Amino acid sequence: MRLAVFRMLAASAGLLSCCDGSPSRFEPPSPVQTDLSVADATRDAFSLPLPNLNDAHRSAFFVGNSLFNQNWLTAPASVADRDGLGPLFNARSCSSCHFKDGRGKPPEPGEPTRGFLLRISVAEGVDGAPLPDGTYGDQLQTNALLGLPAEVKVQIQYTEQAGQFHDGEPYTLRTPHYLLNEPGYGPLPSDLKLSARVAPAVFGMGLLEAVPEQTLVALADPDDRDGDGISGKLNRVPNGVGRFGWKAEQPNVRSQVAAAFVGDMGITSALFAHENHTALQGACAEQASGGEPELSDAALTTVESYVRTLAAPGARKEDGQGRALFAGAGCPACHVPALRTGAVADLPELSRQSFAPYTDLLLHDLGEGLSDGRPSYRASGSEWRTAPLWGLGLIELVNGHGLLLHDGRARGVAEAILWHGGEAQAAQQAFVNMSAAERTALVSFVESL
Amino acid sequence: MVRTRRRIPALVLLLSCAAWLPHCKPKATPNQGEKLRDLDDRLTISALRSYADIAFAAYDDSVRGVQALGVAIEALLAAPSPQTLARAQQAWLAARIPYVQTEVFRFYDGPIDAVELQINTWPIDESFVEAADGERQLGIVQDTERFPVLSAGLLAELNGKDGETSISTGYHVLEFLLWGRDTNEAGPGERSYHDFVTQGKTRAAALAERRGSYLRIACQLLEQHLVQVREAWSAGEAPSYREHFLAPPPERGLYLALRGMAKLSGPELAGERLTVPYETKSQENEHSCFSDNTHADVVGDALGVENVCLGRYTRTDGTRISGPGICAAVAHALPLLGRALTRQISDSVSAARSIPAPFDRAIVGDDKAAGRAAIKRTIVSLREQAVLTERALNSLALEEPVRVSVAR
């Protein structure tokens, strides 16, 4: 709100300044003006609170940040409210995968897996729910408490495929293949369905959560009635419409946070009371618990509030040409530039805000090239939730890499675009047909968001 | 891209803090309606020079402090005793005094921000360094299988790799190695010098060997990182960050300086370092929890802001640096705001000094307890200071005039 006023005033000052002969110092408003984005293009770019938080909410933000960062310990520990890790886990803390609230990446050869995991299933269950493996469950944990075997060691191999742009410039894309070595609890089934996921950045989720469901319903066009080749459908998951996760598998921030606590760290909560191991992993069941549940409702709320109040980074400099090319290629059909929140009773700071995530939160078919062959509720293997584009250009600064897409296969924005197929085939083709200068402008625009 | 100053900012100033806007308290509007005069370029350049001189001197003092700590650590490892351990602890405490005063130079991707994670990250998960007896995990000290040889490269590589509290280098790792866990209500951690005695063929002696080696390497690494930052601020022949910082236009340097002041005051000090332990009443969340030195850290950080505000710094050896301060440059353009900011910064230093030691006792009790009241007063003052600094940034229209919100 405050920044909006600044902008209004700045705009008027800009208008007036024409009269003293100097050029306007203020850019015309870009197509999407957001009130709650924050400008801090440093390593802290993803870690800032919403600028309009009241004192109590700002205090809660910092407390939540400390919980988000802290390592969880083996139970029993001297610090009782921090124990309950594992026995199987991918990470000891939220920040291990979402470092500086940013994005993870697939491990390099020999590197431990951080900010990267594999979901598994053996078949489809009721309403498309992935059916977990009887022994290993629905996610492979690559760490375990001292004295217990980890579920697997993951090794990634890539095969490169060459292609070329319309102007003849060559490119290569790499396809990952996953080798699951040293299974700790017996052989893995041969027909296991695997979905690799990198940890997404966690800023701006309160805004996305506050978009009214009607908005998403209005954006959806599951049968492509308007005939534009773009469908877009809601994932229906237990307890509502899916919004979060690479396939929109979690309906709200609280559930997303609690699912990550149990799935990734082995920490139970009231929402997910069962540990992430199964009855067939006997040694795990003998481990001490960190309480029932291990994460108190209050602590879950603290982390949830933190994630809801992390501000999104504002767009950096505008590039008119890139924006036009983005629009011309049809990207905004799914990467919807502007959304608006409804009323948020418990966090009024999020109410009725415009923001620029460049997503519609809907599932779209991106073609066989990106399919993981593992359906999840209404999302088929090749359907993915439109990934928000905000902050993409800052990942390099915050997280030291530029790897994109759900499994981190794309080495930068251009490769990520080239991987698009299915409904996005026409947009991808438009990119392939662009001149080198146009491609650069488009990529720069995406990186400025 | 630096924008030049506006000619007609009065309108902006008039409305920039209407009372109904969030976080704008009606009482805190010293620049409301204040007419902006141009910055005095010569004054601003002089203020930036003082700022850079203080940065170099404070980092130089920090390097010397850590060198002295290195000497004390060698003495401890050569002949572990209650006395040599106490001297090493004293050297650590002394080394902190100049370092915390440099923290105002953070938060704008300057020289320190490239290596800060290696220097002063906290809170640390001490079990990542060395698990306590009975814990079912191994720390780096104990894990000879994964880490057969401790080296500077290894410690630097592990730092932060597994999350923001999995920290293997820097002041607070040294602090943990020197004091141990703080389970002592009345004072700091009570590590015994026996933890560094390497005689004999026992497991304890083998661990002491690893612990001592870790301590030595971590201290050397800290010195290297600090030297790197100091050199960036040196006025020598080679191109340095200092030159880049002082290069025209002066508005840019002023922007960076104010930004660092705002972010240290607001999110870092008032937020992470004071609000979190205040709200949770948990020593897990205090800055220097092993040595019980948090109260001094808070004062030093607040003093660091005052140093650059006033353009003065007292070196470890007692010599003084002084010149025009950042607040003077601001006050030339915005006299009321500049004065209010100077006053607020001074109030914060006083409030910080009133926090009783040890900090882990000051955070507990009810909100009327002297310790908690002093911490709360410091938080409020630092937040106000951050808001005033941010207002100076936005009022002076430095850099991105309508997008800066750093003080939250």
Image (cartoon, helix red, strand yellow):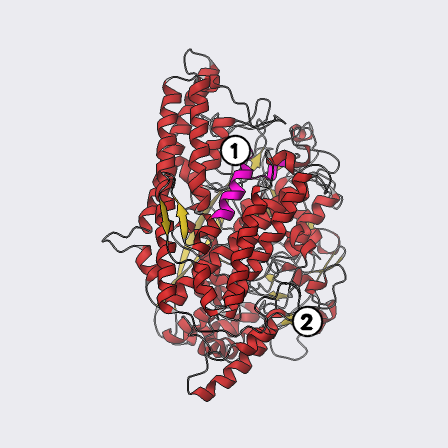
Q: Residue at x 55, y 32 (%)?
A: B292
* Chain under callout 1: B
Residue B143 on image: x %, y %: 47, 27
Does the segment drawn in magenta span residue B301? yes
Q: Main secondary structure of the magenta part?
A: helix
Amino acid, disc 1: Phe
Say few, some or many: other residues with alpha carbon within 10 Å of mark 2 (under 14 / 14 to 19 / 20 or more).
many
Q: Which mark is residue B128?
A: 1
Identity of the residue furthest to the left in this view: B237
Examine the rendering and report whether any part of residue A213 can be seen. Answer: yes
Query: Residue A439's image quarter?
Result: bottom left
- Cα–Cα span, label 2 and label 1: 47 Å
Q: Which residue is mark 2?
A: A220
A203 or B278: nearer the eye? B278
Residue A227 on image: x %, y %: 63, 79
Q: Tell me the element at label 1.
A: helix
Instruction: Give left or right: position of A218 versus B334.
Output: right
